[in-house]
Image (cartoon, rainbow, N blue to C red):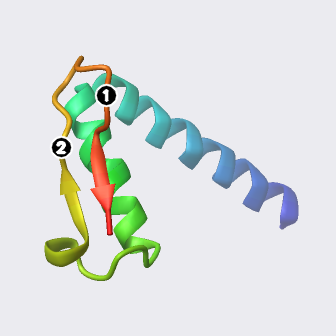
Amino acid sequence: MEAAYKAMQAALRSTILGYILQKSPGLFERLIVELLVAMGYGGSQQNAAEQLGRTGDGGVDGVIN
């Protein structure tokens, strides 16, 4: 069962990474801000996080309070 679980985890990780790599950098930037908020940084999405960056700007992409 452990081997099957590890194989499923690896397949899921590969699927998610493939999905992200096919999308725009803007989606990745939003995903990271949303992930940090979901992990409890800064409170709610509305109050805690702001996406600042624009694709290809080479700078700060967001702020988590």
Q: Nearer the viewer, residue 18 or 34?
A: 34
Q: Position of residue 42 (x, y in %)?
A: 35, 76
Looking at the picture, which amino acid does disc 1 mark? Answer: Gly
Within 10 Å of disc 1 (Cα), the crowding (few <14, some 14-19, many 20+) is: few
| Residue beneath disc 2 | 52
Tell me, for residue 21, which label it has, or none: none
The quarter holding residue 54 reads: top left
Q: Nearer the viewer, residue 61 or 2?
A: 61
The quarter holding residue 13 reads: top right
Looking at the picture, which amino acid does disc 2 mark? Answer: Leu
Q: Which residue is rendered at x = 73% and y = 48% of the image?
A: 7
- In this rendering, the answer to whether 32 lies above or below 14 is below
Query: How many numbered marks, from 0 up?
Result: 2
Q: Which residue is rendered at x = 27% and y = 27% of the image?
A: 25
Q: Position of residue 47 (x, y in %)?
A: 17, 77
> Disc 2 on helix, strand or loop?
loop
Q: Position of residue 64 (x, y in %)?
A: 33, 63
Q: Quadrant of the N terminus?
A: bottom right
Q: Position of residue 53 (x, y in %)?
A: 20, 35
| Residue beneath disc 1 | 59
Q: Do the numbered discs 1 and 2 sit on residues whose CB atoms are within 8 Å?
A: yes
- In this rendering, the answer to whether 5 lies above or below 30 is below
Q: Earlier in the sequence, mark 1 or mark 2?
A: 2
Q: Which residue is rendered at x = 28% and y = 48% of the image?
A: 62
